Image (cartoon, helix red, strand yellow):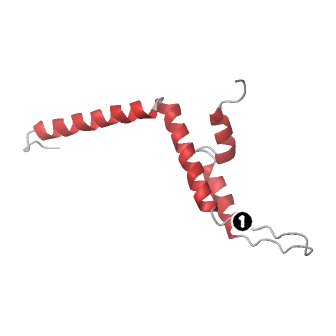
Amino acid sequence: MKGLDPIVILDAVLGTPDNVGYWEDELGEYRASVAPQPRSKREKPYVSPKDLADRLQSLGASRARAMLRQAFGDVTDAAEVLERLAEAIRILDEEAPSDTAD
């Protein structure tokens, strides 16, 4: 399928490490703002969804997963490598003489 890499879309929608502060500020102001009153009885007031924080958390988790995949490839493989590395560090720490100076 042709088109943009999904990370480009995530960058545009969720921001990047360089501009995420701006996005957080804007979302905070949006959440804190008061919706304008409807101009007529037919017009429904604009109300921010009550689950907005949950929606954003889910999107943030998706963004984190995408960044991990971009940096490490398959996340499962990366997790296994990190677990083996942590185990190797524990073994080295246990085998190290206790009277060594740091």
What amino acid does circle 1 point to? Ser
Residue sitting at the far front: 42
Q: Residue at x 61, y 44 (%)?
A: 18
Expressed as whole percent of the image width and height from the top left, the position of residue 62 reads 56, 44
Work out whether residue 21 or residue 44 is closer to the camera in this orientation and state it.
44
**Label total for image:** 1
Q: Residue at x 91, y 71 (%)?
A: 42
Secondary structure beneath label 1: loop
Instruction: Please name the residue that numbered disc 1 is placed on.
Output: 48
Expressed as whole percent of the image width and height from the top left, the position of residue 82 reads 34, 35
Q: Against 9, is 14 above or below? A: below
Expressed as whole percent of the image width and height from the top left, the position of residue 14 reads 64, 47
Q: Residue at x 71, y 64 (%)?
A: 30
Work out whether residue 22 or residue 35 is closer to the camera in this orientation and state it.
35
Work out whether residue 79 or residue 67 is closer to the camera in this orientation and state it.
79
Residue sitting at the far top: 2
Expressed as whole percent of the image width and height from the top left, the position of residue 66 reads 55, 38
Task: Tell me which corner region of the image, top left, top right, bottom left or bottom right, holds residue 102.
Answer: top left
Task: Tell me which corner region of the image, top left, top right, bottom left or bottom right, holds residue 39.
Answer: bottom right
Q: Against 97, is 77 above or below? A: above
Residue 88 is left or right of residue 97, and the answer is: right
| Figure quadrant of the N terminus | top right
- How many residues crowd around disc 1 within 10 Å: few (fewer than 14), some, or many (20 or more)? few
Q: Residue at x 34, y 33 (%)?
A: 80
Task: Tell me which corner region of the image, top left, top right, bottom left or bottom right, holds residue 98.
Answer: top left
Q: Against 73, is 45 above or below? A: below
